[in-house]
Amino acid sequence: MGLGMGKLRHTVAVVDDDASLRRSAGRLLNAYGFAAVEYASAEAFLAQPASADVACLVLDIDLGGGMSGIELQRRLKEAGSNLPVIFITAIEDRRLQAEAERAGCIAYLRKPFAGADLITAINKALGL
């Protein structure tokens, strides 16, 4: 898939403790012309100086034992970041969804979600 001259490749970070989901989301994003970077935890994302180049964040709410996705988004907001966030989760919980939406997420996708839904949400987040 050729990218036009001068077309900016937006970087999308995928933060999920599930390695197979991270890989498949990364492949999907690359196929649609995005540059995907993958992180296994919120802490790994925060530790990377390259995270400053990220245009959109695809973030699992439940990241295993460490910081939650909602907590990561809160920290980013407190630091003055207005990075658009798309939450993904396998958990069926209306309270959690309401909390994520109050925190200002662009989209809330329940696993397993269609690849097209993720791409639509990212395009919306980036104003494409």
Image (spheres, rainbow, N blue to C red):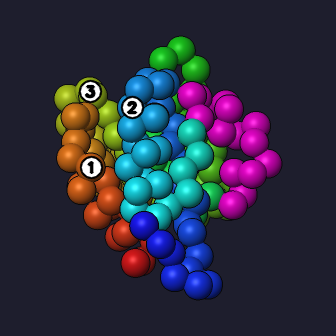
Name of the residue lying farthest toward the top: 65
Under mark 1, the amino acid is: Gly
**Label 1, on which residue?**
115
Quadrant containing the C terminus is bottom left
Q: CA distance from mark 3 to mark 1?
A: 18 Å
Residue at 63% from the left image edge and 50% from the top image edge: 76
Please say if the residues under marks 3 and 1 sit with CB atoms less than 8 Å apart. Answer: no
The percent coordinates of residue 41 (x first, y second) are 58, 29
Under mark 2, the amino acid is: Leu
Residue extent of the magenta highlight:
39-53
**Label 2, on which residue?**
21
Residue at 22% from the left image edge and 42% from the top image edge: 113
Quadrant containing the N terminus is bottom left
**SS category of the residue bearing label 2:** helix
Q: Is residue 68 above or below residue 46?
A: above
Per the rendering, the mark at residue 37 is none
In which quarter of the view is residue 117 placed? bottom left
Q: Is residue 84 above or below residue 45?
A: below
- In the image: residue 78, left or right of residue 98: right
In which quarter of the view is residue 123 placed? bottom left
Residue at 29% from the left image edge and 64% from the top image edge: 120
Most common secondary structure along the magenta stretch: helix
- In the image: residue 79, left or right of residue 97: right
The percent coordinates of residue 53 (x first, y second) are 69, 61
